[in-house]
Image (tube, rainbow, N blue to C red):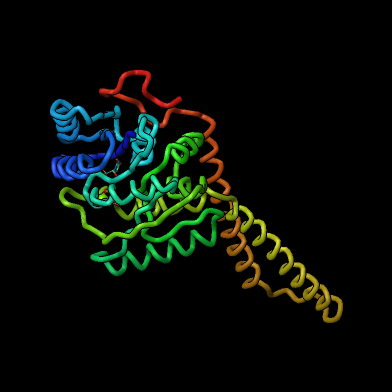
């Protein structure tokens, strides 16, 4: 039995040695063989050299290095494609996902759970941040067809069955939280206490969070498009009522000219509605544009995997 652990790394030289040690300690304690797949997502610091050093010291270490930064989603995908484990764990390389949970995950996975998911609480999170995150999850949950839960991220163990299912989805815009939920299978949630990053700093800023948020809503449904349709229908209905109202006035009282305020209001309001609708359509068209190009999700620069070890 083989356990594969996939770790995306982007500029993590400060924490990587700690991660490697904690993870090795945990993995050598569980039954079965294991491999650690580190994916260097185009780091600009010493991450890659460190990975090569680990690989030299320890035969369990595999690494994949990208030609540039392709983002965490691509890094995870690469790791999953190269994973040959019967069970595959995905975790961050900054020790926010405690390796000590792997033993417990494995126990559940062997009982037949295809996705053993670690859910964190929000200890130590900034109040405002966690308020926004919670509201976001509630909103996305309502807007999309897949189920997202607060505190559930990428940290999980997948059975071969679940992993193969994930790999059948070739979309370019990957929103993993949605993909995990979309495939389904038997799930088990375990809980852990939130940890702050052991060293180094987070790659997220406000802009990337907003972009990620929009992705989450758009990549799993076309409800925003339907929303435009309903707003349009509602506006037509409203203007018909108004038209009749004016027309009746003209018949009984004759034409009276003033109407500057309502005219300007209508122009501005519907101008705005139309721009928003076009924007929403544009978001989808943009995504389609990227999908049809069928570019690879990442480019390899270097790896210690043999050439034919990638799935499909
Ligand atoms: N990461 C990556 N590519 C990126 C950004 C992040 O592979 O472009 C990795 C990063 O090295 C870490 C994980 O994704 O292992 C989570 O990133 P981070 O800790 O910055 O996110 P946070 O925990 O703050 O949500
Ligand atoms: Mg982190």
Q: Residue at x 40, y 65 (%)?
A: 134
Q: In the figure, 267 relative to 290: above or below? A: below
Dividing the image into 4 quarters, which one contains the N terminus? top left
> Where's residue 294, x and y in %?
50, 29
Residue at the limit of the structure toward the top, as seen here: 307
Q: In front: 167, or 106?
A: 106
Left or right for 176, reference 207: right
Q: Residue at x 78, y 74 (%)?
A: 246
Q: In front: 139, or 276?
A: 139
Q: In front: 98, or 65?
A: 98
- Please tell me in which quadrant of the rendered image residue 31 appears: top left
Q: In front: 14, or 309?
A: 309
Residue 284 visible: yes
Left or right for 288, reference 243: left
> Where's residue 19, x and y in %?
18, 44
Q: In the figure, 3 relative to 263: above or below? A: above
Q: In the figure, 214 relative to 311: above or below? A: below
- Please tell me in which quadrant of the rendered image residue 259 appears: bottom right
Left or right for 224, reference 229: left
> Where's residue 272, x and y in %?
56, 59
Q: In the figure, 122 relative to 305: above or below? A: below
> Where's residue 290, x and y in %?
49, 35
Residue 38 visible: no
Q: Residue at x 19, y 40 (%)?
A: 24
Q: Residue at x 17, y 52 (%)?
A: 198
Residue at the limit of the structure toward the right, as seen here: 251
How many numbered badges does the structure rendering display? 0
């Amino acid at each position: 039995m083989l356990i594969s652990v996939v770790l995306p790394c982007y500029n993590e030289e400060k924490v990587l040695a700690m991660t490697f040690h904690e993870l090795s300690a945990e993995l050598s304690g569980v039954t079965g063989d294991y491999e650690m797949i580190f994916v260097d997502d185009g780091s600009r610091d010493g991450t890659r050299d460190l990975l090569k050093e680990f690989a030299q010291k320890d035969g369990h270490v595999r690494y994949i290095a990208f030609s540039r930064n392709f983002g965490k989603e691509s890094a995870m995908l690469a790791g999953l494609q190269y994973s040959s484990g019967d069970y595959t764990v995905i975790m961050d390389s900054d020790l926010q996902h405690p390796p000590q949970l792997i033993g417990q995950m494995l126990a559940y996975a062997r009982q037949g759970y295809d996705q053993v998911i670690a859910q964190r609480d929000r200890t130590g999170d900034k109040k405002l941040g966690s308020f926004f995150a919670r509201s976001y999850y509630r909103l996305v949950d309502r807007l999309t067809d897949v189920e997202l839960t607060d505190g559930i991220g990428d940290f999980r163990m997948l059975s071969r069955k679940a992993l193969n299912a994930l790999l059948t989805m070739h979309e370019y815009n990957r929103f993993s939280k949605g993909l995990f939920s979309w495939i389904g299978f038997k799930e088990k949630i375990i809980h852990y206490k939130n940890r702050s990053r052991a060293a180094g700093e987070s790659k997220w800023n406000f802009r990337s969070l907003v972009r990620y948020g929009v992705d989450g809503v758009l990549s799993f449904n076309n409800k925003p498009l339907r929303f435009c349709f309903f707003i349009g229908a509602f506006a037509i209905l409203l203007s018909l009522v108004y038209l009749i109202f004016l027309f009746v006035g003209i018949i009984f009282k004759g034409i009276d000219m003033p109407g500057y305020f309502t005219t300007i209001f209508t122009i501005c309001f519907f101008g705005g509605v139309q721009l928003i609708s076009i924007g929403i359509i544009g978001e989808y068209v943009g995504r389609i544009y990227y999908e049809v190009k069928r570019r690879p999700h990442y480019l390899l620069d270097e790896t210690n995997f043999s050439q034919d070890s990638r799935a499909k």
